[in-house]
Amino acid sequence: MQHSEQPAEQPFWRTKALEDLSPTEWESLCDGCGRCCLVKLEDEEAGEVHLTRLACRLLDHGTCRCSDYDNRFDKVHDCIKIDAAKVRTIDWLPATCGYRLVAEGRDLNWWHPLISGDPDTVHQAGVSVRGWARCESKVKPSNMHRYIIKDFGA
Ligand code: SF4
Ligand code: SF4
C-alpha cells in the first residue's frame, strides 16, 4: 500500500528571510531573553565595547521584556531598533538570539516560545537575564565598570 503523507509544513522562520517577516512574525522571533538590553560600556580610546550585567532601567526583571516597549526610543535615547540589517552587523547580539539564529540559517532552540509554546521556558533554560542582571539605576556611573562581564552568563 502506498502512503500519501504530505511533508510537514515548515514554520515561517525556516522559510522566510528576516526582511520578509510580517511585524507580528518579527516580534514573535524575539525569545524574551533580555540580553540585548544589557548596558554596554564603550572604551573610546581602545575602540572596544564592554558588556555588563547591568540592565537598562526600563527592563522588567521578571518578564525580561521592556516595560515601555512602545515608547522605548523616547525614554532611552540609546535604545537600538533591531532590524534585519542590524542583526547581521551587531556583534553583541547573543548567539542564542532568535534573530541571529535565523540570520545564520539555524533553527530555534527548544526553549524558544515559538517552539515550546511557553514564554517561561527561556527563563527555565537559564538563557534570560532573570535573576542575574542588576538594574543600572541602582549603580553609580563611576562603578559600572565593576559589572563588566566577558560574555553572557559570565
Ligand atoms: S537578544 Fe534577541 S531574542 Fe533576546 S531579547 Fe534581544 S532581540 Fe530578543
Ligand atoms: S528601552 Fe526597553 S528595549 Fe530598549 S534597551 Fe531598554 S529595556 Fe531594552
Image (cartoon, rainbow, N blue to C red):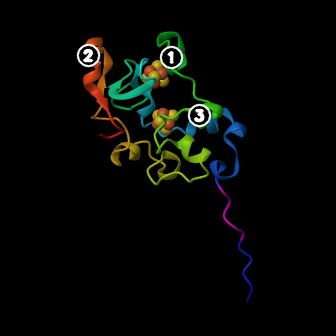
For disc 3, the marked residue is 89
Range drawn in magenta: 6-10
To which quarter of the image does residue 140 belong?
top left
Q: Is residue 153 above or below residue 134?
A: below
Amino acid found under the numbered disc labelled 3: Thr
Residue extending farthest to the front is: 45
Asked if marks 3 and 1 touch (Cβ < 8 Å), the reply is: no
Q: Is residue 19 left or right of residue 128?
A: right
Asked if the beta carbon under badge 1 is closer than 8 A to the nearest atom of ligand 2, the reply is yes
Where residue 137 appears, as percent x and y from the top left, is 30, 14
The response on whether ligand 2 sits within 8 Å of label 2 is no
Label drawn at residue 72: 1
- The structure residue drawn at horizontal position 48% and vertical position 40%, both measured from the top left corner, is 31
Q: Is mark 3 within 8 Å of ligand 1?
A: no
Label 2: which secondary element: loop
**Residue 7 drawn above or below residue 137:** below
Residue 133: name its quadrant: top left
x 38%, y 43%: residue: 127
Q: Which mark is residue 115?
A: none
**Residue 139, label in figure:** 2
Is disc 3 placed on a helix, strand or loop?
helix
Residue 57 in magenta stretch = no
Specify which label sits upstream in the sequence, 3 or 2.
3
Q: Earlier in the sequence, mark 1 or mark 2?
A: 1
Q: Which quarter of the image is occupied by the N terminus?
A: bottom right
Foreground of the two, 68 or 73: 73
Residue under the point 29% across and 40% down: 154
In front of the other: 28 or 81: 81
Q: Nearer the viewer, residue 134 or 45?
A: 45
What's under tag 2, amino acid-wise?
Answer: Val
